[in-house]
Image: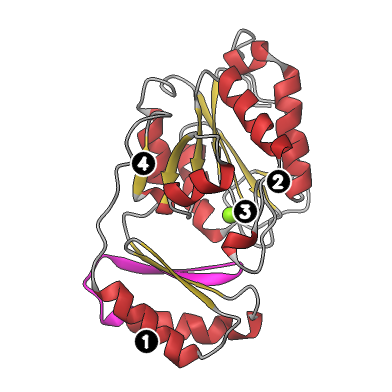
Amino acid sequence: MPLSSDRIAPAVPQGPWALFLDIDGTLLEHAAHPDAVVVGDELRSLLAGLDAQLDGALAFVTGRSIAAADHLFRPLKLRAAGLYGLEHRLTRDGPVEAAGEPADIAALATEIATELDSADIYIERKGPILAIHTRAAPHLLERATELVQRALAGLPEGYRVLAGNAGVELMPLEAAKGAAIRRFMQTPAFRGRRPVFLGDDTSDENGFEAVNEMDGVAVRIRPRGPTAAPYALADVNETLAWLDGLTRAGGQVLAGEQTSPERS
Ligand SMILES: [Mg+2]
């Protein structure tokens, strides 16, 4: 679906609804290195407030590991799908269900680091996912993508390459945000609600499609190309202001006391 200029920020949806949030580029501005981003108290309390108002129907859906998300937002712990859905924590204090790590990813990481030979490239191993971050060296994104495509040929079937705004990742096929959202929607805190998903990158498109199919609200932050999301928000600041508006709209809307079948 081509991007049109008339996409607008979504109106506050009539509840009951559930909120799924990507982290990087959605709630937090990107940094050259993923460990360089910082979470302020304001964001922490905004999320804690939304989680309480939604009775726990809120989850991160991120490419980070859940451990990395917990570290970033400490001491706040939320429900989360990490590594694009390869990890889940379905309840706030429950265990993290994690995927295994094939041994060959470590060797691939070393091989690709040697080939790219740049201190501005950050190569991250996240369980069975290999992420090449090129935000600090955008001119190397194309070369990095070629190397990852080549590596794909040497892996067992069931892997794919996903190129994003500032990097390229090699990941198992089952790492998909849409599947993670569907899984949460079957759990008690989420069941019967309308999903709202906010994301900013290629890896979020699969989540947008799933949410569209569930008659939910898909919102792409800073859209630059084709997207399945019918709604847009300009940047992180606008996203945080929109979320803040939801908390101000209050428990009635969030809890669904004003239910309406109309899509606004
Ligand atoms: Mg993102």
Q: Please indicate whether residue 146 sits to the left or right of residue 160 in the image.
A: right
Q: CA distance from mark 2 to mark 3?
A: 9 Å
Disc nearest the viewer among 3 and 1: 1
Inspect the image, locate mark 1, and give the three-letter code of the amino acid beneath it: Glu
* Real-space CA distance between mark 4 and mark 3, rounded to the nearest whole angstrom: 21 Å
Residue at 34% across, 61% down: 127
> Relative to 219, does residue 196 appear above or below in the rendering?
above
**At which x and y percent is residue 92?**
43, 29
Do the residues under discs 4 and 3 have CB atoms within 8 angstroms?
Answer: no
Give the residue number, with chain letter if any, for mark 4: 88
Range of the magenta residues? 152-170
Q: Quadrant of residue 178?
A: top left
Where disc 3 sits, the SS reads loop
Residue highlighted by disc 3 = 200
For ligand 1, the image quadrant comes to bottom right
Mark 3 or mark 1: whose residue is earlier in sequence = 1
* Quarter the N terminus occupies: bottom right
Figure label count: 4
Place of residue 55 in the rendered image (x, y in percent of width and height, measured from the top left): 52, 18
Judging by the rendered image, the residue that carries numbered circle 1 is: 111
Q: Is mark 3 within 8 Å of ligand 1?
A: yes
- Given residues 257 and 127, the one toward you in this image is 127
Reading the image, the residue beneath label 2 is 232
